[in-house]
Structures are given as C-alpha cells and as structure tokens.
Image (cartoon, coloured by chain):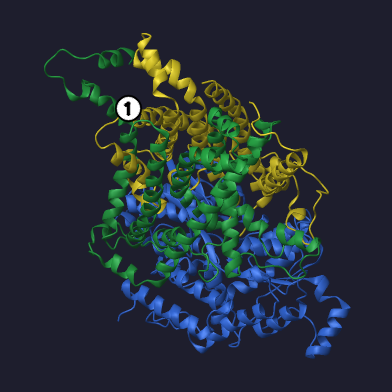
Amino acid sequence: MATKFLAKALLASVALATLSGAVMAQEFDYGSFPGYTLKVKLIGGTQYEKLYTRIPEWEALTGAKVEIVSSKNHFDLDREIKQDIASGQITWCVGSNHTSFAPQYGDLYIDLAQSIPASELAKYVPGTLQASMVDGRLVQLPRVTDVSNLYYRKDLYEDPAKMEAYKAKFGTDLAPPKTFDEFKQQIIFFADAPNLYGTAFAGKDEGMSGRFMEILRANGGDLFDANWKPTFNSPEGVAALQWFKDIYDAGAVPAGTVNYTWDEIGQAMAAGQLAVDLDWPGFAGFYSDPTASKIADHLGFAVAPVGTSGKRGGWSGSHSFSVTEACDNKPAAVSLAVFLTNDDSELMEAEAGNLPTRSATFDQAVKYFNENGKTALAEMFPIWQASLADARTPPLIPQWIEVSNVLWPQLQAAIVGEKTPQEALDQAAADATTILEDAGILKQ
Amino acid sequence: MTTDVQTLSQPRTKDRVSFFASPRAIPYMLLLPAIVVILSVVLVPLLVSFWTSFTAYNLTKPATLFQFVGLRNYQRLLTNADFWWAFGRTFVFVTITLNLEMLLGLGLALLVNKITWGQRTLRTIMMFPMMFSPILVGFQFKYIFNDSIGLLNNALFDLHIISQPIPWLVDGTLANFSIIFAEIWMSTSVFAILLLAGLMALPKEPLEAARVDGCNPLQVFQHITLPFLMPFVYIAMTIRSLDVARAYDMVKIMTNGGPAGRTELLWTLMTRTGYQNSQMGMANAMGYVSIILSIVFTFYFYRKLVAARTFMGGAQ
Amino acid sequence: MSRLTIEKPWQRWLIRFGVFVAMAILTVPGLWVVLTAFRPNIEVLARPAVWIPQNPTLDNFARLFGLSSAQQGLPVLQYFTNSLVISITSTFVAVVIGMAGGYSFARFSFKGKATLFLAFMLSRTVPGVALSLPLFIIWARLGLIDTSFGMILVYMAVNIPFTIWLTDGFFRQIPVDLSEAAQIDGCTRWQAFWKVEFPLARSGLASAAIFAFLTSWNEYALASQLTRTTASKTMPVGLMDFTAQFTVDWTGMSAMAVLIIIPALVLTFVVQKHLIAGLTFGGVK
C-alpha cells in the first residue's frame, strides 16, 4: 500500500520534473525535501569517501540535509547493522550494503524496484542489477562492482629468456593463462622463491571460500544443488582444492599465503614479489601508481582463466546503497541512493579506478583515462567489463557467511596438509548441512 | 563532605542511628560509587547475555531472543571439539604469556632499578609498548612476521641466516609463538612498571640490616625483596589474567585463529560465532563456559594476593 | 637514593648492556611503525628490504589531514579531541572512585569485604563478546550510543576495579600509625587522609592513573562497537578508517599511530615526575 502510494508520488514528481525543463529530461527526479534531515550509514575508508563529496550537491538539489550517523569499513558496518536490528534501533534511512552481506538482513531494506522507474533502472549494468536482488527484491542499488581478473608482470611475460624456456618446456608460447591448469603451470614455472612467487591467494576468511568457489564453478561444480544441499565435496570440488594444494606444495606461492587477505597480496604484488595476481579491479590504481608500486611500468591485464568446464568462475560482488523499511521519508532516501549511483557519481567512481555499475560510464571512463595519461586503467577497463558477463555472486542466502566460516578452515587444513582434500571437504559439507538444516533452508 | 565525615566519626547520642549515618557505613559509602558503576556497566548486561545463552538468539532475528532452548547450546558445546581445542589453547596461551611476562617484567624492573642515570627517560622507554593500542600491535606484528615482505624475514635474509622465508604465521608452532611474542611484547611493560614501583617503595632498613648481617645479594633478594614484591606480583598477575582478553584485537588481526584453527583462541571463536555467524546465543554460552577459566585464574591469584597481604599487614 | 650494592665495573657494564638489549627489544618493533609513517609505501613492504629511508616524506601526514589532493583527509582532530576528553575524564573519575574504594578495603574491616573484593575482580573476567551486545542494546535504549558520556561510563567500569586493587595495595604500605598520630594531633580522619595518607599514596595513584589513561586511550574492542561517528569515535577506532575491503593503508595507519603514541608518551613522561616525587616522599618514612 505504502509503496504503491510512494510510487505514485514519485511518478507525479517525475512528471513535474519533466515539465520543469529540458535539462532534466530523461533524468531521474530527485524531488524536493526542504528541511528534512536524512540519516545515512555509509561505508568509510579513504577509497569510498571521495564519492561523499557529492552529497552537498544533492543537498543543494533537494533542500534536504544529510547526517552521516556512521562511517566504518564494511565488516564493522555489518556488525553495527546487526546490532541495530538486535536492539530495534533502525533510526536511519540509507545504508551502504554489499551483495555478499545483503541476504543476511532479511526485510530490513525495501524493494527499490517499487520506487524507481524501470527507465532509470535500465541504465545499470543488467547482470550487476540482477545480482543485487535477494528473493526477487531489489534490496540495493549497486555502486561499484568487483570481479576478479588477472594482473601480470609484462617484464616477466615478455622476457625472451623466460619465453624460450617456457616454450622449450611446455611447447606453447608464454602468454597470460587461459585455463586454470595453464595458470597453475605458469605459477610454478615463474616461482623463484624467496624473491619471486608465481602468485598468492587469499587464504583465510571469505576470501579463501570465494577463491575456492570460483574454481569449483569454473570446473562445472557448485557449492549447493537446487535444494541447498552442499555439493562442494564433489570431484570438481576436490580438483579445485587440489589446485591450491599443488601450487602451495610446489612452493610457488608464499608459505604465508594461507594467512593472507587482500592487502598482503596487494602489497606483495606491488613489491614485485608475484608474477601474476588474480584480483579485484580496485588494485589497478594502486599497482599502476609509481610512488606505491614497483611494477607500475610493466603491468598487464587479462581476463580470468576458465576451468575444466570451459567456464569462468566469475566471483563477483557489488558495493551498494539500500533504503530501510523503517525510514520515515523513503522518497528522500531513494533519491539519495539514486543520486550516489547516477551517471556523474559513477564516473567519479570510475575515474578513481573502480568498476562502475552503469553501462554508459565505461566508455566515458576509458576516454577520461586516455585523456589524463592513465593508460594502464584505460587498458584494464574493457577487460574487466568483458568478464562481467560471466560474473556470479556467492549464494544469496543469509547463511553464506556462516557456511564460509566452516569452509575456509577446512580448505586451509587441506592446503597445509593436515587432511586430504576429500576429508576436508566432507567435513565442511557436513557442517554446512547442519547450518542449513538448522536454518530450515535444507529439509532433512 | 568534610563535615559529614567529621560528624560520622563522632559517637552519636541518638538512640536510633540509621545505618547509613553510622560509622559502620563508611566503608560501604566509600565503595558505593564503584559498586554502582560496575553494576550498571557490567552486571546488568551480563544478566542479559546469561539469558541469551539459553536461547537460540540470532542477531538478525530479534524474535529469537525469546526462543528458549534450555541447555541446548551448552550441550552442543560439550561435544564441540573445536571449542575445547580453543579452550585448551587459550589456557596454555594465558599460562605461558602470564608467566613469561612476569619473569621478564621482574628482570626488567630489577635491571632498570640498578641504573641511576636517566631513570625517568628509561622508565618512559620501558613503558613504550603500552602506548600501542592492541589493534595497532596486531597490524604491526602482522607485517613484521609477514613471510615474504616482513621485517623479520627481511632482516634474517640480509644477515644471511636464512635462504628460504620462514612462514611465521602459518606453521603451527611458529604461529603460536608469534602471537605469544606479540602479546608478551605488548604487556611485559605492565609487569615491569608495577614491579618497579614495588621495588622503589621497598623499605631500606631491612635491606641494610640484612647486608650488615652478612647476607649475600641473592639471599637479600630471596628473603626480603621478593616477599615484599609478591603482592605486587599478584596484583599484576590478577590484573593481567583478566586483561589478557585484550589480546583478542591483536590475534584477530594477526591470524584470526588460522590457519586451519591452529591459533584459534576462545575470543576469536566466540566473536566469529556471535557476530559473523549471528549466533549470539551460542557465543554467549561459550562465554559462560570460558568464564570458568577466568574464575580459576583469578581465584588462584586472589588467594595468593590475600596470603601475601597478610604478610604485609593492613586491615583484613 | 642511596645505592645499597656497590657493583664492580664489569657488573655495571653487564647491567647496562642488559638494559640496552631489553630496551632495544621493547622499542624496535614500535619504532619501525614510527619510521613507516615517514616513508612512501614503495619502501615499506619491500623485498629486498629498504632499511634506511631513501625518500623520507611527510606525505602520509598530509594525506591524513587532507592536505593532499589524492584523497580526502580524516577528521583526525575530532577523533583526537574525543579520545582526549573520554580518556582524561574517565581516568580522573575512575581514580577518584577507585581511590575511595581502595582506601575502604585497605583501612576498614567490614562485612562481606572479601566477597566484594572478589566480585570487583571477577567483574573483569567477563569476555568482551558476552558484554558488548547487551551493553550495546542497553546503551541504545538510554541514548548513549555514539556519545562521549557513554564511552566514559564504560571506561570507568573498566578501570575502577583495577584502580581499587592498586590503591588498596599502596594504602596498605602506609603505616596506620601515621594517620592515627595525625588524628591524635587533632586532625579529623578526613584531614588526616589528605595531609598524611594521600601524599604518601600519590605514587600509587599516579601509576593507577597512567594505567587507566593508557587503557582508555588505546581501547579498541568496546569503542568500535559503541562509537559510530565523529561525535565519539576515538583514535584507535579511527585507525580502522585505513582499512578498506581489500586494502590496508599501512603507511597512513602508521602516521595516525604516531599521533596516538606521541601524546601518550609525553603524558607518561610527565607523570613519571610525579611518580618519582611520590616515591621519594614515601621513602622518607
């Protein structure tokens, strides 16, 4: 009822806006909320806060004020939102969200498809928008997308001695890997510990679970079947885990990698310690910055390899904005969420090296990079954009993080050799089954 | 206030003196503010979480707060091997770190006490690690112990001691060593400064008397210095045994219990269960089982403290 | 202070060497953080290692304060003020309340004393996670979330038990006769306390205050839950602003760490003086 009314109100205001002038034509109407104070909870950190410099523009446009009631990194924000739910203190309207976290929050957030015209939603990258749905509801508007692809060192791949040695050994030309088998082969080929490793992978927390999921899916397997029965202890799963174990046993990755998360991998790559890195778009700016990275001058980009099924794993996720059900002025909240993901905002995100969520922004960004001498980023964008077609999120169920928390310690145990991959995955599958049964998702 | 105390210390002539106005009330009145603060900030929340340990409380589903499941959380814990491993590991971690910190702190205090010049600067330097937030200590040692670009391995490489990196935070023994080292680095100063304060408050007469009687320095230390220091040792031990959970911030950053649960402590396990997995009921059940551990440590040191204080005098 | 033992020169050098080694171990890991604050990222986590800074820089501080165009600064001054207000207030109140309690335990015999003393100790055995959520819910109901007052209250509770035990110990060391003598001379118990016992216990109070201050100044776990914005976020919570989803800006974090460490260091150094004054006064007896 209320949403219908709001939708009507919004439509009415869209109509008004259309009347108000050609400048606003085809533009979303941001409405007018003079004197209203909108409380928002936003992801903090230097990488994300640049966008918030646009908030005053929205304030000028709508007459509303924005009060940032919280600004933290996402893991702390997640905990804080759970605390708010627990204490029934949803006193804010717009919250930063993430596709991996969104399913946990139940009906905290509204279905945005009810309040944003389809013409506006059509401007977002379709796959990214699809991944923002939970149970058929659009609970978030994507702001930047993450999908992993390859960064590699051109100086190594174009080194004649290396090229010759590789050709002699494997009979093929040295080029960025097309399959995970080839990837493994090159990782081991390049490794020259302790000064150079083939690669490094996120070895703990959701990073480990996600990397495993990626290869599992590329091999044609998946975490769960259609009835949410865990199936990752399948032969495809064992093969995926074996992939990590092989490069670990070969000493081709730093031994510490099972304790690494993204920042250590990024630091190692930037320090020139790794030959290839399967990683997020956010690192492009860092790796190509000569004051922060040793590999800035010879950074190459390539799409992620495919698995034995010929598919990409395409592990992907998006940062996003959501509007709470408890919000006292949903039109204002929706207006801000749209504003912070509109073409201008997305261009700002893209210029900082993040993958935008609006289709139109990609070309604009590449143009900007070329004009501003950021050739590396101009080169990287089309590659990452190409891989978005294969992008897949982790399972969008509230228990994903919990399942991940029983999965990654078992993956670690197999990688460091405490268990065989089959034993480890069977154990994790048994634990995951208990979790999903307890949650009532998997029927016994 | 002044007049209050004055009148309180005078014997009253009235027949019925209310308890709060009687001299007997003085110690309670002095303690009242402390009691009020502790009750409101610790006890009340504690009762709430005690209740949740008997429910299927899920953080994101407020209604589950009233879903009573009896002892189910506790029953599950009893058969949960991961929990008992973490329990045992925490016990060992606390035992090792506290004892080493005490010994090293004592050594440090004795050494610094011997130096006559620059005492003030020296003591400030001695307390340097106390300026570091546990979370900062976590990041700091995460990078120091990083196997590929960390400070420690870099130093060992450049000194040609090793040719292959040592995976400090991965190998089971080394990872536990690393978190213990970080904890000791962070907290030894607490012991050192407390014991140094004790040493400086040491009365000089018995020491001189003992020397005149021909005791050697070791005997003086054993029979005079050490007994005098013992209450300080136990105060420090008690405080640290309670405070040691601060190591959570640090371990969370350094290893988060990994790899493969090799450094999993109760605190990392509980927080992950409660906040990441949202199973607050279960996490609080773990909390209450782990309180047993703290009570054992605290009670032990408390008994020692009381015994040592009897030696020192004062009201019982 | 008179030296009781006269060391031989080789012993003195041995002691000095021992002190040097101990101090090196205590300071090097920390100094490395300080050094990191003045270096560009490319030199910090490198292999082969760059030991001597090649390009010392103030860039990290510039970024921190938003003086660099590369990124937005952080509200460091606001965090700093919050930290200062919260730490100083909670320390002062905790020391006053704790001193009253410690005095009570040291000087009076009363019913339930042992139980009460133990209860204070046990109040700190509660694991943070069991406390943090209920505390949050109650604080939310009382409107204390994201307020300095809420944090002050929590830190008082954290520091009071500890101050009680510490001051209890120090008061016990002061002979009861001194206060009794003063009371015979016509002082009230109140006056005797301030004129005789308090000055003698000052060293104890100084160290209790340092501990309480440093605990509050550096506390992260509770502050990260109960603070949310610049209205109450403290410096250690601000450190986490340098962590994004994928990256940790270690050089920026180190720069902020320096800003956390310096005031604590200065304060500790200043209070040392009072510690010494108290101790020498105590030594006169």
Residue A148: x, y in percent? 62, 70
Which residue corresponds to mark 1? B30
Residue A115: x, y in percent? 40, 57
Quarter of the image with the N terminus of chain A in it? bottom left
Picture quadrant where residue C104 is located: top left
Quarter of the image with the C terminus of chain A in it? bottom left
| Chain letter, green in picture | B
Label 1: chain letter:
B
Looking at the image, the residue that sits furthest to the bottom is: A171
In this rendering, position of residue B262 left or right of residue A291: left
- In-front residue for pair B113/A266: B113
> How many numbered marks are there?
1
Instruction: For label 1, count other residues whose C-alpha is less than 10 Å away and answer few (under 14), some (14-19) or many (20+).
Output: some
In this rendering, position of residue C121 left or right of residue A214: left
| Chain letter, blue in picture | A
Picture quadrant where residue A91 is located: top left
Residue C46: x, y in percent? 76, 59
Looking at the image, the residue that sits furthest to the left is: B15
Give the residue at x 72% y 78%. Answer: A187
Residue B173: x, y in percent? 58, 67
Does B54 sit above or below residue A245? above
Q: Is residue A141 visible?
A: yes
Looking at the image, the residue that sits furthest to the front is: B213
- In-front residue for pair B118/A135: B118
Does B140 sit above or below residue C161? below
For the residue labelled by badge 1, is the local secondary structure a helix, a strand or a loop? helix
| Chain letter, yellow in picture | C
